[in-house]
Image: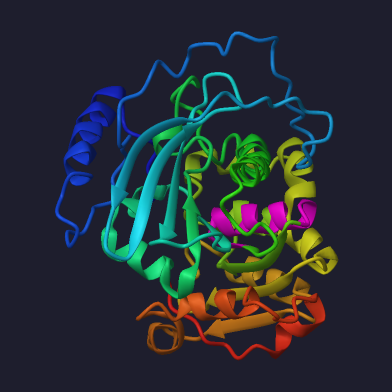
Amino acid sequence: MFRRPLCCFALLVLTLAHWCVSAQEPGATAAEPSAMPWQLPNPAQHHGGPPRIEKWDTISLQGSDLRPDSPLIGQTDEFPEFTRELVRVQWRDADPIDLYIVRPKDASRPPVVFYLYGYPREAVRFLDPAFCKTVTKNGYAAIGFSSMLTGQRYHDVPMKEWFVSDLQHSLVGTTHDVQMALNYLSGRGDFDMSRVGIFGEGSGGTIALLAASIDPRIRAVDVLDPWGDWPSWLTGSRVVPQTERADYTSPDFLNAVAPLDPVELLPKLNSARLRVQQSLWDSGEIPVASRERIAAAVPAAAQLAQYPDIHDYSEKVGMNGKMLDWMHTSLAPGADRSPASSGTVAPQACHP
């Protein structure tokens, strides 16, 4: 069963623990509990300008006024194969975002791949040097941050509220964050923003699809077991506590999240190359009915990769960084990035 974020005391303990992890030797492997990798100014401090406006009824930034504060550089680590920056960015009051920016060593303007992991997982895996070495292979930069109401970003709400109870805000807000992070990277000038991809898993896969449907800068989308088909998912997913299920299957709740359903978005997603991956052996997080409807919604020009068991998954996409091959091929210089070509790429993949 997924559990909600820990109390403030536990978060403080884990913060101290991850401070130690970030100082480990380059060959060490970082754990993945909740954490803030460094201490920075009070996140509740107002930026000093007029109130910011955010439109929560649309995944587009149109109508919103999310003006960014100046980024704060928390830490830069140099490794033989890559450089890792921890940068705090903020464009929403009282919601700072710890942005992990990992780039291959001495790369001038590398292409960019975002990594969004599903609730309740955080982006702290970017503290693991082995992971960073893998995702920067072939000269690609890797960008990661945690979704709203997840880990470091769970704050200023009653403890009874969490990612799914505020599903509309969680998905819309994080989709806004992807677009704002793209704006930030564009402003830096040290990345090739004509070659941007996004990988998402679980709820992160849903957010990746939402972001790609609204932002043409995203040229390739790779998702693994995205949440979706909300009536079936909210009824049957183990992520949802049984005691709360009735609240999330009510007409009002379902109507609010209906525009954010991949089943509705996938047939219209034609601005980027697309691969949808599904692990068929576990129906706990993604109910069978949801998985089938998502698969049926994948456009013909895209690639649908289904793994019947863990052995098939491991062989095709579960080791040695194979998961990255599809994305790197899709964003390679001179690659045909039209959506119609995405189904021609051989299903080579490993979950990074």
Please indicate whether residue 17 sits to the left or right of residue 331 in the image: left
What residue appears at the point 76 percent right and 52 percent down from the top-left corner? 215
Q: Which of 104 and 329 is in front in this view?
A: 104
Q: Which of 113 and 268 is in front in this view?
A: 113
What residue appears at the point 55 percent right and 28 percent down from the top-left corner? 90
- The type of colouring in the image is rainbow
Q: Picture coordinates of residue 243 (x, y %)?
A: 49, 40
Q: Is residue 146 magenta?
A: no
What residue appears at the point 47 percent right and 43 percent down from the top-left corner? 146
Q: In which quarter of the image is the C terminus?
A: bottom left
Q: Picture coordinates of residue 51 (x, y %)?
A: 69, 12
Q: Picture coordinates of residue 343 (x, y %)?
A: 72, 85
Q: Picture coordinates of residue 235 (x, y %)?
A: 61, 53
Please indicate whether residue 149 sits to the left or right of residue 311 in the image: right
Please indicate whether residue 177 sits to the left or right of residue 256 in the image: left
The correct choice, above or below, for 77 with respect to 82 in the image is above
Give the magenta range: 197-216
Q: Can residue 108 be seen in this view?
A: yes
Q: Can residue 118 be seen in this view?
A: no
Q: How many marks?
A: 0
What residue appears at the point 80 percent right and 76 percent down from the top-left corner? 338
> Residue 261's image quarter?
bottom right
The chief SS type of the magenta part is helix
The correct choice, above or below, for 82 with respect to 176 in the image is below
Q: Does the magenta stretch include residue 209?
A: yes
